[in-house]
Image (cartoon, rainbow, N blue to C red):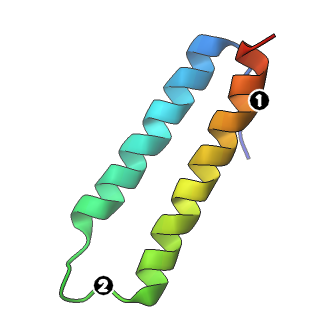
Amino acid sequence: MGNAVQDKDSQLSYLKNRLNMFLEVLDSMDPESTDVDDIDRLLQMLDELEFKHDQFKKDWDK
């Protein structure tokens, strides 16, 4: 998939990019045509972002 993100600056950049991607997807959605599958995908994206944050935070606490 991609290279491992090792240092804190790269990890923060990764998280910011993923959050921006999420916001772009959210902004592009039409409330009138959004269905349950779309909402589920947004929730999945947030779960993945939270997982990565938790994973990186363990590195930062060392």
Residue 35 position, x and y percent, is: 37, 89
Instruction: Name the quadrant of the C terminus.
Output: top right
Residue 4 badge: 1
The residue that disc 2 covers is 34
Residue 22 position, x and y percent, is: 40, 53
Residue type for callout 1: Ala
Q: Residue furthest front?
A: 61
Q: Nearer the viewer, mark 2 or mark 1?
A: 2
> Which circle's residue, 2 or 1, is located before the other in the chain?
1
Quadrant hosting residue 34: bottom left
Residue type for callout 2: Thr
Residue 59 position, x and y percent, is: 77, 19
Residue at 51% in and 77% down: 40
Q: How many marks?
A: 2
Quadrant hosting residue 12: top right
Q: Relative to 16, does residue 41 appear above or below in the rendering?
A: below
Q: Residue furthest right?
A: 62
Residue at 24% in and 65% down: 28
| Viewer-nearest residue: 3 or 9 | 9
Please report contact status of discs 2 and 1: CB closer than 8 Å, yes or no: no
Residue at 43% in and 43% down: 19
Q: What kind of element bears circle 2?
A: loop
